[in-house]
Amino acid sequence: FDKSLWDFSEQFAGGKKSSLKIQCDTTLDSTGTNICYFNKTRKIVNAYKNKDVSGRLVRVKDCKKPSPLAQDAILAVNVPVIANVSNSSIGLAKNENLKIVEIDNETITFERDRNGDLDVITDLIENFHEHFLLGYCITVHKSQGQTIEGQVNIFDWHFIKKHDRIAYTAVTRATKFKNIHVSTEFFGNSKDV
């Protein structure tokens, strides 16, 4: 972390409140890595980012055993995904970030970075909603352990900032304070505030 990020994050780890002001300029059109608290928000951001992709539409209703977190997705090269399960038969670890590098009539090939080593895995398209989620936006929970270079867009900040452990996890995904941007848009329910 840089010093500013360290100082800012300490307020969520039981330290004194920071006088630093976070940038409140994130929108659905912002570039960078998107994280949120609520799955409803994750689905909204993912749908927005995925809507103009030219590719193959894979509907949740057509999957035999979809995850309850799944949403309809347009699959194409460079679409980001996150593993929603571990699956040893294809070497998949839960919460891994991947991107689609090839898609044909039956299979999808994904690329992933494992500690600087790029490799690929292939799975059947029919398994997409069982094994993967769109990865334009992921939850704070799924982002744990990640270090994100560049801009980090935090949605659901109105909720996250009220919960120190969640806020600490969210902001410490970034490496620099200036890279943290939050959204003031609200996608949840009034009971979530």
Image (cartoon, rainbow, N blue to C red):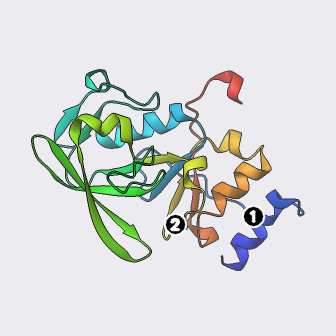
Residue shown at the point (41%, 50%) measured from the top left: 82
The answer to whether 92 appears left or right of 191 in the picture is left
Real-space CA distance between mark 2 and mark 1, rounded to the nearest whole angstrom: 15 Å
The image quadrant of residue 74 is top left
Say which element carries label 2: loop
Residue shown at the point (83%, 60%) measured from the top left: 13
- Is residue 68 in sight in this rendering? yes
The image quadrant of residue 173 is bottom right
The answer to whether 150 appears left or right of 130 in the picture is right
- Seen in the picture, residue 157 relative to 16 is either above or below; the reply is above
Instruction: State which quarter of the image contains the N terminus.
Output: bottom right
Q: Percent x, y for residue 177?
A: 64, 69
Residue shown at the point (70%, 22%) measured from the top left: 191
Q: Which residue is the site of mark 2?
A: 148
- Seen in the picture, residue 98 relative to 62 is either above or below; the reply is below
The image quadrant of residue 187 is top right
Q: Which residue is the site of mark 1?
A: 9
Tell me the crowding category of disc 2: few under 14, some 14 to 19, or many 20 or more residues within 10 angstroms, Cα based: some
Instruction: State which quarter of the image contains the C terminus.
Output: top right
Q: Percent x, y for residue 27?
A: 48, 46
Q: Percent x, y for residue 43?
A: 44, 34
